[in-house]
Amino acid sequence: MYLFQIIAIIGSVALFAFVIDFIRRGLLKEKYSVLWIASALVIMALSVKKGLLDGIAGLLGIAYPPSLLFLVAFIFILLINLHFSVVISILHEKNKTLVQELTLLRNALKEAGVDLSGKAEKKGPGNG
Amino acid sequence: MKNKLLIIIPAFNEEATIAGVIASIRRHMPAADIVVVNDGSRDRTAERASSGGAVVLSHLYNMGIGATMQTGYKYARSKGYSIAVQVDADGQHPADQIERLVKPVLEGKADIVVGSRFLGEGDYRPSIARSAGMAIFSKLVSIIIKEKVTDTTSGFRAAGKNCIDYFASRYPDDYPEVEALVLLHKKGFSIMEVPVSMAERAGGRSSITPMRSVYYMVKVLLAIMVDLMKKN
């Protein structure tokens, strides 16, 4: 076993352990951990099975098989980043709607004579 | 039913000019209601607007011009206004010209009316860089909507009921003016320009810095292309 394999195995096992621990402690939602876990497992498999790494590298015409590990890691990082950009965009849209609704709601409360501490200053129409 | 007119003023740190703008609108358009959408200003914009007699809607924090305009349109929709006019808080859009924008909407000639600085009124002279950018936008938008548009970046606009409803559900995020026109055209709304003269801003600074203007161009061009490809 080469040193690079040992380093890659340690690295991917550590990544796997961190991700599982983050989920366990509630710091990471399962939904956002899938790509991380997949990348840890794939890198782990490629570094344990030298034959697999060499085989795929040969198939792709990569002369130096360990650089396939970099390629795989790079692709995963790219996917994870793209995923985050999508998630952020969705959150942005939801955040916008939330702020707008809150803004209108606060105005409606003000019109109804309710101040923001929640106490009614004067009774609005239809207030039984 | 009587046509209810709402003036929407988006404002971010405009304490120097907001009161004057509101006073001028109240003088020229006494029947109109005024709503100031305060986009998380850190100065006294909200107080000035409120004591000037406008309804003030304050965002919890700064959300950008697109979200701010849309809050105004959502308010207009929920209150059942039939016409909404966008007026800048910096004093660029003279209140005595609002009537010109409103009239074609009232007469049913257009769903949205844009006040253009390039139809002979006033003497607006943008910098070379800015006029080049504006020329590109107006060429592009004119081609897309198959109708001549001279001032696509003008934020001085009057929107009819159906436009209000549409903008309340969908409005571009940042630098929204150009993109909004393309969206409206795609939805089949009719767009019309009327000549207006605009004043120099009475205070504050343009949000468009040289660095941002590059982003502005790229963002708007990209947004237009993507809008044309989107299904709905």
Image: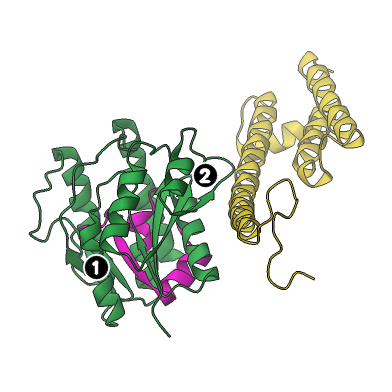
Chain colours: A yellow, B green
Task: Quarter of the image for the C terminus of chain A: give it.
Answer: bottom right
The picture places residue B164, in percent across and down from the top left corner, at 44, 70
Mark 2 closeness class: few <14, some 14–19, many ≥20 residues within 10 Å: many
Question: Does residue B229 lie above or below A76 as drawn?
Answer: below
Please say if the residues under marks 2 and 1 sit with CB atoms less than 8 Å apart.
no
Q: Chain of mark 1?
A: B
Q: Is residue B16 left or right of residue A113?
A: left
Which residue position holds label 2?
A: B63
Which residue position holds label 1?
A: B99
Three-letter amino acid code at the position of disc 2: Met
- Residue most extreme to the bottom: B1
- Where residue A61 sits, quadrant-wise, is top right
Circle 1 SS class: helix
Q: Is residue B33 left or right of residue A56?
A: left
Mark 1 closeness class: few <14, some 14–19, many ≥20 residues within 10 Å: few
Residue drawn at (43%, 65%) of the image: B229
Query: Are marks 2 and 1 in one subunit?
Result: yes
Residue drawn at (41%, 72%) of the image: B163
Q: How many marks?
A: 2
Residue B153 in magenta stretch: yes
Residue B31 in magenta stretch: no
The earlier-in-sequence mark between 2 and 1 is: 2
Three-letter amino acid code at the position of disc 1: Glu
Question: Does residue B176 lie above or below B160 as drawn?
Answer: above
- Residue most extreme to the right: A24
Q: Which label lies toward us, 2 or 1?
A: 1
Q: Chain of mark 2?
A: B
Residue B173 appears in the picture as rendered: no
- Where residue A37 sits, quadrant-wise, is top right
Q: CA distance from mark 2 to mark 1?
A: 30 Å
Task: Quarter of the image for the N terminus of chain A: give it.
Answer: top right
What's the magenta region? B151-180
